[in-house]
Image (cartoon, rainbow, N blue to C red):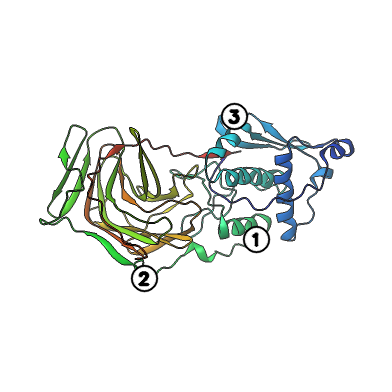
Amino acid sequence: MNKIKCLYLTAGIAASIALSSCEKEYTNYSVSNATLQEYLEKFLYEAESRGVKSLNPQKTGLKMYFGDCDEGAAGVTYYENPIRIVIDKEIWDKYADYADGTSQNEHTVFHELGHGLLYRKHDNSTLSSGEWATMMAGDPLPSGSIPNTNFRGERRTYYLDRLFNPNDKKEPNWAKPTFDDPTESLTKMVDDDFSSTYDASHITLRDAREYTTKISGGEFVFQNKSTNNYIVPLQNVTAVNGSDVYVETEVKIEGSNKIFTLEFGSRDESGQDTKYTYHYMSFYDTRIRLGNTLCYAPYCQIKSPKNIYGDDFVKVGIRKQGDYIYYFVGGECIYKDIVDTNISGTNYGFIVYANSTLRMKNFRIWNDGTVSLYKSSAETEPQIINIEERETHNK
């Protein structure tokens, strides 16, 4: 079983095999849908471009079609004669609502074809960052792991290279990203130190039944006393979509629920509903999940170099620069990724999960200075937010 993540769909390949003629000539071969046929041909193209020219499912046999998979699986491969692959139609259609939908579908088909045509088994080996070393991660998984795979950009190229040439185990450069100074070429626009003279007029401070928000001893403290998860928009600024930005804070989390999210993005208040769209870095005890809310699920899960649930405050930050986004923990760049969604950097804050307390020593934002930016004076209310950590399974 496998759970998958974001990917990119390359240009379609013209169909080279008419299904009707295939079914007449090869009785053990059928692909029931033109879309699945396109993905199959793309898989064969990627194989041939990497020197694997022996794949001929029309002759060796293959049955691939949409159906209903058990246990929420996005796809299942059956080692029968011929090989049979079922792609779950409900999950396939569900991906269409997300920015990475076509990429999710590509990974589903390619993972199953990796089983069916290449006879690859599940492989849960990891890179130094904690990311999966192959796109064939799946059950049984190590405790606490999710098999989401970032299958986009240079990562997609690497995973396909590894899939078709499994003996080449050289670690890619992106597994150890570097970024010496995340504030480089940026201007500090927000510098909140939560001192006795700090202006907190734009922050909701209250002691309510559900949560307590206060500034005390040079710290911003949000105690979530409820069973809900709260999104806390600490800063709202006027910005321009696509501008470069870095947001940073020093935090530690207390309580039984060891989850915390740093996010930046946008807030849309239309009618009575408030919608947040954001990039996020979510800490799950010793692991970190990265992604954005326009995609179906987290890109991946990696190891955390620092423990934000200990006695010390830990510096965490997110930097957007051009077409890339960088994540920092303890002053170290831990992950580099492409920016594939247009999320503006106008709202900055956190998600504080049920029965936990956020303690923060400072909060800073830098911007590229291409536009005049102003801190909003409007008070922003914490909002209950439903968190759905989706995972897609392949067998």
Crowdedness of circle 1 by 10 Å Cα count: few (<14), some, many (20+)?
few
Question: x and y percent of residue 392 in the render?
Answer: 54, 39
Image position, residue 379 (x, y; %) = 22, 44
Q: Amino acid at mark 2?
A: Ser
- What residue does disc 1 label? 167
Mark 3 vs mark 1, CA separation in Å: 33 Å
> What number is the disc on residue 81?
none
- State the SS at label 3: helix
Q: Work out whether 93 lies above or below 58.
A: above
Q: Is residue 88 left or right of residue 350?
A: right
Which badge, 3 or 2, is on the more N-terminal residue? 3
Image point (17%, 50%), residue name? 200
Report the front residue among 379 and 232. 379
Q: Earlier in the sequence, mark 2 or mark 1?
A: 1
The circle on residue 185 is: 2
Decide which of 108, 33 is in the foreground and name it: 33
**Whether label 3 touches label 2, CB < 8 Å:** no
Q: CA distance from mark 2 to mark 1?
A: 42 Å
**Total number of numbered discs in the rendering:** 3
Instruction: Identify the residue position indicated by label 3 in the image.
Output: 70
Looking at the rendered structure, the kind of residue marked 1 is: Asn
How far across and how far down the image is residue 112, in percent? 66, 43
Q: Quadrant of residue 152?
A: bottom right
Compared to 164, does 40 lie above or below?
Answer: above
In depth, the one of 302 and 184 nearer the eye is 184
Name which of mark 3 and mark 1 comes first in the sequence.
3
